[in-house]
Image (cartoon, grey):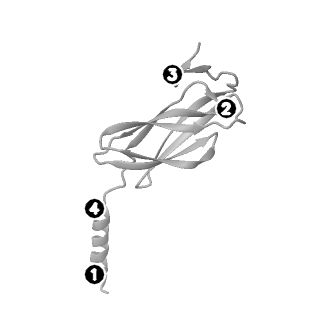
Amino acid sequence: MKPSSLVTMMALVSALGAGLPARAASCLSLELNAPVPMCAGQTSMVSATVTNSCSNRMSATAQLAIDGQTLPFEIAFAVPANSSRTRGIGVPVPASATPTSHTLTITLTDSAGDESSATIDLSISNCLGTTPVTKSVDGRLQLLH
């Protein structure tokens, strides 16, 4: 190959590489809200709001971790373009959880592999004896105060 051909080929490869779009950061953001307190041995609902700032529909999976330990399940989200979607996520709080503050981290990974995460402090309590007392009236449960 002639030196001039090599220079032309390198210029072509360089021009092609310069024209490639840069990989955009994730369009997804995440906000979390949790009840206070959460009870050891019960499942509590954490509210997760996912916002998609892109002009196309985004799909993502959410991975949960409590105090850095990943929980053994993932949750799928699909969020329309330029919108938000709120979803309740049942978080099983082990009966052995220490009644104190713990950290929940949810990490979203979109189809391109980009990640967005949010962390919230959870207050875990031993809620034994706090189950509401109910009675059945005409087949319906009613809360007694």
State whether residue 24 is above or below residue 106. below
| Distance of label 4 from label 2 (alpha carbons) | 55 Å
Q: Residue at point 28% right, 71% down?
A: 11
Instruction: Give the residue pinned by disc 2.
Output: 40
The mark closer to the camera, 1 or 4, is 4
| Distance of label 1 from label 2 (alpha carbons) | 71 Å
Residue extending farthest to the bottom is 1
Q: Amino acid at mark 4?
A: Gly
Q: Nearer the viewer, residue 122 or 54?
A: 122
| Distance of label 1 from label 4 (alpha carbons) | 21 Å
Instruction: Give the residue pinned by disc 3.
Output: 138
Instruction: Give the residue pinned by disc 1.
Output: 5
Q: Residue at point 30% right, 86% down?
A: 2
From the viewer's perspective, tell me whether residue 2 is left or right of residue 59: left
Residue 86 screen position, x and y as percent: 41, 35
Q: Secondary structure at mark 3?
A: loop
Mark 1 touching mark 3, by CB under 8 A?
A: no
| Distance of label 4 from label 3 (alpha carbons) | 71 Å
Precedes in sequence: disc 1 or disc 2: 1
Instruction: Give the residue pinned by disc 4.
Output: 19
Quadrant of residue 38 in the image? top right
Precedes in sequence: disc 1 or disc 4: 1
Q: Nearer the viewer, residue 33 or 38?
A: 38
| Distance of label 3 from label 2 (alpha carbons) | 32 Å
Precedes in sequence: disc 3 or disc 2: 2
Structural crowding at the residue carrying mark 4, measured as other residues with C-alpha within 10 Å and reported as few (<14), some (14–19) or many (≥20): few
Q: Amino acid at mark 2?
A: Ala
Quadrant of residue 23 in the image? bottom left
The mark closer to the camera, 4 or 3, is 3
Q: Nearer the viewer, residue 143 or 117?
A: 143
Precedes in sequence: disc 4 or disc 2: 4
The mark closer to the camera, 3 or 2, is 3
